Image: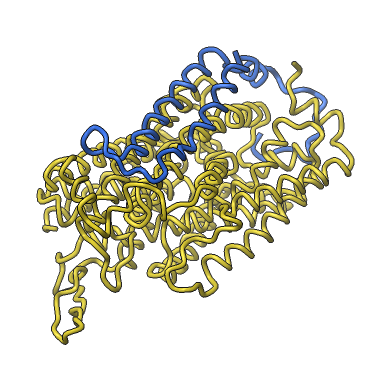
Chain colours: A yellow, B blue
């Protein structure tokens, strides 16, 4: 990487800050504008902002790294399932939640569940669990950003960030490939500060505008990076032939030995998570009308394809080009290294790097705003006896966002060298997917009860914690991959437990009042 | 048409599991492993399904319901602080 590339990234951050300043000028200054953009977002902006929010470091950095390790089956695991299931959730759940949100003025999921299930207790239980599940999602972003910048800036500042040479088995040495790169802790910190800045200025309006802009940037730069990398590898056919010719890389052309059948199938439950993402709920509420959803429902699978196919191919090619990774490196760095080593135009390198960071930041911003909104709306305003002005509500939201960012940053620095972005992301999605039965029941099952929902949330939390500990924290035998239960992903087990609990307890407890059913279920 | 939408949905759901190419690393179009090509086509098919859905199975009634005045029989656990 050259200095000019670095300055392009800095310039991109400057653009985002400018966007935050401009979006502030369009703000009406009310808390409704800060938290849900006055419910006035049209189809194109809704598509770009929802897509940008859904695709994070997981989609670019994580998918490339996972394809490097597990091959082309990763596309089927996440991307093609998501194309089908995400749009189904937008169609079945998103539009209906937008409708109740508009009709009754909701800002957060907890508000909706509290009234739909007639239970403040459920909302208080749900709040910390949603926050705890969003944190791994934030970690994915912060770690991805730090690792990507580290890989992409290798060799740029050897005097400032020196890394000791690698000692070879024969006693000789060779330069460390990350010598002179910006350490992950600095990269992660800068990303957090830039996002905080434009979110603080413009609230969700700033996030929606930045998301739309960043979605265009990361999609365009992804295509450019794909073209440049394939050209440098001798063209599409030569790049794939290199994989077929490499003993290390060849198994990645198929799924045998990389992914199990049940594992592949049970990944279908992971995309259900979008039905329970609190930040996506908030984005749905920004829509001007139900018709605004149409473009999102149709274009979402195509957008996923445009982003994921190049990433999967780059990850697969990386296995042939880079071979086995050395000590101190993990697959999260693969995309950064491919860009750094193969894209020799400093300007294009800078644009590609900005695109990857755009994908990461376009999720962080919505998650930050959403956590601030939930804390303000579901905790402070509910528990406090006094009334607050709009300015005070915004201030409270910002203070909570700062707290969460500090906690997330500390955790990211602790986990940055051990956590695999893809696996961490899958665990986050697992928790939200397991909560899907309660939103599905809330929308479609009149007989569902608060006791059923509370029981399902508790079962999900307990099962998730136990299995997360086993997979991500407890010591595993060397070479062990992600946790499978009877060959299935943990999401299948936890979601089944949650759904069964929800149905059984609902059927054995008092149904909601007729007035509540009438309020939330339109007459046919 | 809603039934047709969901029948196509479940057909696609089943076709996602392309076990017949599980151990097949054949390259198509000169650069694309065959299973990746299948799933790329699957993404396009999903988009076509949703295009069909928004044209023929769109829930018009939801928008009308959202725009109608809220019922006076509210059982809200408390007034929304933002409403």
Q: Position of residue A120 (x, y in %)?
A: 76, 47
Q: How many circles with numbers are drawn on the protein?
A: 0
Q: Residue at x 21, y 76 (%)?
A: A163
Of residues A121 and A346, the one nearer the viewer is A346
Q: Residue at x 14, y 52 (%)?
A: A342
Q: Position of residue A133 (x, y in %)?
A: 57, 55
Vertical position of residue A448 compared to residue A150: above or below: above
Of residues A520 and A476, the one nearer the viewer is A476
Of residues A403 and A469, the one nearer the viewer is A469
Would residue A38 be visible to someone looking at this image?
A: no
Relative to A106, is A368 on the left or the right?
left
Q: Position of residue B29 (x, y in %)?
A: 23, 32
Q: Residue at x 73, y 50 (%)?
A: A456
User: In terms of image quadrants, where is residue A270?
Assistant: top right
Would residue A295 be visible to someone looking at this image?
A: yes
Q: Residue at x 72, y 23 (%)?
A: B70
């Amino acid at each position: 990487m050259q200095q000019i590339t670095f300055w392009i990234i800095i310039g991109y951050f400057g653009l985002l800050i400018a966007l935050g300043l401009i979006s502030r000028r369009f703000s009406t200054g009310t808390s409704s504008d800060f938290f849900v953009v006055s419910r006035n977002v049209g189809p194109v902006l809704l598509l770009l902002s929802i897509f940008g929010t859904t695709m994070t470091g997981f989609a670019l950095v994580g998918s490339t790294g996972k394809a490097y390790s597990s091959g082309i089956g990763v596309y089927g695991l996440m991307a093609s399932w998501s194309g089908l299931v995400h749009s189904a959730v937008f169609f079945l759940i998103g539009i209906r939640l937008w409708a109740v949100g508009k009709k009754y003025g909701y800002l957060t999921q907890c508000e909706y569940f509290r009234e739909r299930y007639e239970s403040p207790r459920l909302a208080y239980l749900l709040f910390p669990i949603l926050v705890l599940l969003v944190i791994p999602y934030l970690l994915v972003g912060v770690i991805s950003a730090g690792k990507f910048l580290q890989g992409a800036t290798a060799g740029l500042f050897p005097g400032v960030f020196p890394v000791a040479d690698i000692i070879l088995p024969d006693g000789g040495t060779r330069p460390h490939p990350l010598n002179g790169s910006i350490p992950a802790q600095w990269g992660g910190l800068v990303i957090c500060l830039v996002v905080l800045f434009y979110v603080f200025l413009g609230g969700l309006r700033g996030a929606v505008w930045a998301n739309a802009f960043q979605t265009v940037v990361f999609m365009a730069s992804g295509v450019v990076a794909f073209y440049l990398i394939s050209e440098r590898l001798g063209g599409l056919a030569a790049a794939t032939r290199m994989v077929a010719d490499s003993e290390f890389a060849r198994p990645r052309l198929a799924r045998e030995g990389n992914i199990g059948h049940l594992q592949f199938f049970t990944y279908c439950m992971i995309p259900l998570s979008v039905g329970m993402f609190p930040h996506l709920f908030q984005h749905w509420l920004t829509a001007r009308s139900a018709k605004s959803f149409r473009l999102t429902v149709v274009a979402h699978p195509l957008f996923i394809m445009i982003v994921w196919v190049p990433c999967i191919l780059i990850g697969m090619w990386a296995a042939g080009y880079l071979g086995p990774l050395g000590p101190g490196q993990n697959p999260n760095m693969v995309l950064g290294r491919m860009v750094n080593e193969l894209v020799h135009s400093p300007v294009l390198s800078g644009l590609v790097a900005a695109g990857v960071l755009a994908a990461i930041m376009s999720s962080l911003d919505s998650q930050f705003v959403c956590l601030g909104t939930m804390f303000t709306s579901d905790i402070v305003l509910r528990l406090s006896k006094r009334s607050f002005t709009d300015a005070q509500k915004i201030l409270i939201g910002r203070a909570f966002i700062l707290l969460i960012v500090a906690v997330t940053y500390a955790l990211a620095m602790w986990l940055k060298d051990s956590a695999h972005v893809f696996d961490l992301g899958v665990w986050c999605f697992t928790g939200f997917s397991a909560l899907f039965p309660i939103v599905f029941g809330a929308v479609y099952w009149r007989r569902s009860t608060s006791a059923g929902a509370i029981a399902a949330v508790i079962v999900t939390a307990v099962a998730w914690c136990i299995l997360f500990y086993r997979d991500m924290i407890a010591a595993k035998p060397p070479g062990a991959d992600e946790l499978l239960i009877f060959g299935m992903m943990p999401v299948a087990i936890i979601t089944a437990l949650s759904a069964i609990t929800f149905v059984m307890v609902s059927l054995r407890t008092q149904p909601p009042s007729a007035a509540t059913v009438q309020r939330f279920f339109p007459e046919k | 048409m809603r039934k047709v939408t969901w029948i196509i949905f479940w057909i696609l759901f089943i076709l996602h599991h392309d076990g017949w190419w599980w151990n097949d690393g054949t390259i198509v179009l000169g650069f694309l492993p065959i299973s990746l090509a299948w799933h790329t086509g699957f993404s396009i098919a999903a988009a076509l399904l949703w295009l069909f859905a928004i044209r023929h199975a769109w829930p018009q009634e939801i928008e009308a319901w959202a725009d109608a005045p809220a019922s006076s029989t509210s059982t809200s656990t408390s007034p929304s602080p933002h409403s």
